[in-house]
Structure formats: structure tokens, C-alpha cells
Image (spheres, rainbow, N blue to C red):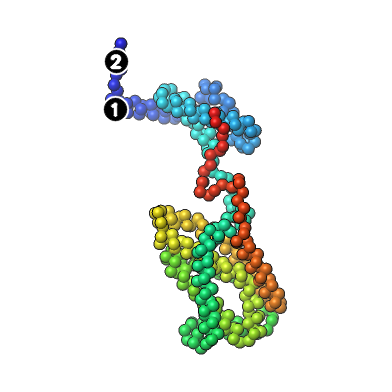
Amino acid sequence: MIAPTRISQPALAFARAAIAADRIVVAACGIIPAMATEYPEWQRLQELLARGKAEGFNRLSADEIVEFGKWYRRVAAELSYQRTRAAEPARIAFLNNLYGECYAHVYTAPRRPWPSAVHFFTADFPRTYRKHGIWMGIAALLFFLPAIISFAVTWHDSALAAQVLPAELFESIAEQVERHQEIKDWLPIKKGIPDSTFLMTHNIQVSMLAYAGGMSAGILTLILLIQNGIMLGVLGAGVGLHSVKTATSFWGFVAPHGVIELSAIYIAGGAGLVLAYALVNPGIYPRRIALRNAGKDTLILMLGLAAMLVVAGCVEAFFSPRPIDPIYKFVVAGVLAALLYSYLLLAGRRVREEETPSDHPRLMTPLPPV
């Protein structure tokens, strides 16, 4: 009886390298395509794969899908077995090629058209707004609280406010008073088209700046929110001090588009604060990963508020300046506010069973056991 020979590690490594070289030569010489006729036991799997690639796997029947799954598991097991034996490099190369083609159709990313506008606006955007509701609330507070304080200070002592605040801000008050002393059409329709484009782009630029300010640890975002809040409060109080009629006309102009536009500004600020928090306090993740995770949600918020600002720009250019009784404008503003916040707070709450969680970017096609 011959005793088994102990193979040294260098010899074993050399043998493995030789097998790998054989596989490369086999693939380079074009042997793999010819294997279809030499391995008839895999013909059925090749037929199903060819049909799926040509017509789409959704055209296969349920029984054929089940059959394809069984064949896929069988070729995976056979490939593993042949690699363990380290025999017939051509067969291993064929099985590896066939398995790789099947793998690409068994493990697939969830297919959703991009951009999926309907799903984005009915689910992604409002859900992300609610997910970061705390930051949205903080941003709203940083915007509207300075507006209330500056309104009160200007209303109580406009001279003191004029000494503290920029002179350009008080010059704009005189312009607004002159514009709103009486109800008139001060923005013709023909001029409204270029003005609406300017308003949209300007507001989007301001929002982008507030959002990008998050990368300064939120300092620039805080400054922009507080500054815009102060401007709103001072302007409202300055116009209101002139007369009740002027104030009513002014707020009747601001309210319809303001409920959307001002909401978009604080949402942009909230998105900036989300980035700032990830930058300052990344938690258990590296800072790069924390910023990337926060960036996914903030991008959704910015795309959503860009659409809001498009609507606000159209309202501001074509409806707000029209010579309509301010009462009707306030009614429209109330309806828009109710619709907007009903949408942000309620839309997308019902999770459909067929939806794929975003935390699992790849799915395994459910296949029955062999």
C-alpha cells in the first residue's frame, strides 16, 4: 500500500496558479461560447436565460420563474463542487460564465423610474420633512421669532429701529408704502412673466445659500434665517405704521405667495441645520459617512422646496399684485396654507407593502428552495 504523499505549500500554490492560468487561456481562446453544445444538461437554463434577456423576465410564466430559480441554485452548487475538485477548467469557466449571467438577473436593484415624480411628491418629500421635523421647527423659530421681535421694536420706536438697522431697509419701506396706498395693478401681466422667472431663481438662490450654510457648522444658515426674519418684521411694521389701509393692502399682497415662499425658506434653513448637525456631531459614523447620509435627505428637501418656490413665484407674479380686494387674497392664502401643511404633515403616511425600504438598496428575487 502506497502511503499518501504530503504536498508542500509552495507546490500547492503552484498547482492553483496553473489551474487559474488554464482558466484564463480557456476564456481567451473563446472556448466558453462553444460549451453550450458540449454541456446539454444546462440547455434548459440557457433557454430560460435567453428568453428573459430578450423578452424580459416579466414575460415568463410563474412556473418558468420557479424553474429558473431552481436551475440557478443548481448551477451555483455545481460551480462550487467543480471548483472544489479543481478539475476540467473549461467546465469551470463555462459554469462561472453561466452563473454570472444568471446572477445579474436574480440580484437586481429595485427599479423605479428616475425621476419618479409622483412617488417623490406623494411620499418622499413629505416623509423627509416629517423625519426632520425638529430641525424644521428650529429653523422656523429662528426665522419667525426675530420677525416678531423686530416688528414689535419697529412698531414701538421706529426711530430707534432706524438707528440700529440698515438704511436701505427703511428706504424699501417708503417704496412699499407708495405702492400699497391704494389698490391698483402695479405689475401688468406682460411684465409678470419675466418677473416670475426672476422671483423663482432669486428665491431658489437664497434657499440654496441657507442650505449650503450648513457646511459652515450652521453659522451662515443661522445668520440668513435671523436676517431675513428681521427684514420681514421691520418691513411689515414700517408699512403698518403708515395706515391700516396700506398695511391691509401690503399683507394682502404678501400672504398668498408668502405662505409658500416663507415656508420654503425655513425648510431650506432646516436642511442646512441637518447638514450642520451631521458635520458637528457625526455620532458613531465617520464624518464623511454622516454627511453623505444627511445629504440624501437634504437633497430631497431641496428638490421639494424648489418646486414650492416655482409655485410661489407664479402666485407672486400673476395673482398677488392683481387689484383684488385683500379679503379675497387672505382667503386664498388661508386655503394655500391649509393645503400645504396638510400635504406636508399627512401625505405619504400609508406605506405600501410593495415599497422597498431605502436602507436595502439590493433585493434578492424570492425563489423557492431546490
What amino acid type is highlighted by mark number 1? Gln
For the residue carrying disc 2, how many other residues have a C-alpha within 10 Å: few (<14), some (14-19), or many (20+)?
few
Residue drawn at (62%, 75%), measured in percent from left and top?
A: 254
Secondary structure at badge 2 equals loop
Residue drawn at (44%, 63%), measured in percent from left and top?
A: 276
User: Quick one: 215 or 191, which is closer to the camera?
Assistant: 215
Residue drawn at (44%, 25%), measured in percent from left and top?
A: 82
Mark 2 and mark 1: Cα distance apart in space? 19 Å
For the residue carrying disc 1, how many other residues have a C-alpha within 10 Å: few (<14), some (14-19), or many (20+)?
few
Picture coordinates of residue 138 (x, y %)? 50, 67
Q: In the image, which disc is placed on residue 3?
A: 2
Q: Is residue 10 above or below residue 200?
A: above
Picture coordinates of residue 29 (x, y %)? 45, 27
**Split into 4 quadrants, where in the image is the C terminus?**
top right
Residue drawn at (55%, 60%), measured in percent from left and top?
A: 129
Q: Residue furthest top?
A: 1
Q: Which residue is mark 1?
A: 9
Q: Earlier in the sequence, mark 2 or mark 1?
A: 2
Picture coordinates of residue 302 (x, y %)? 54, 61
User: Quick one: 287 or 369, which is closer to the camera?
Assistant: 369
**Split into 4 quadrants, where in the image is the N terminus?**
top left
What amino acid type is highlighted by mark number 2? Ala
Secondary structure at badge 1 equals helix
Q: Is residue 81 visible?
A: yes
Of marks 2 and 1, the one in the foreground: 2
Picture coordinates of residue 103 (x, y %)? 51, 35
Q: Is residue 357 above or below residue 321?
A: above
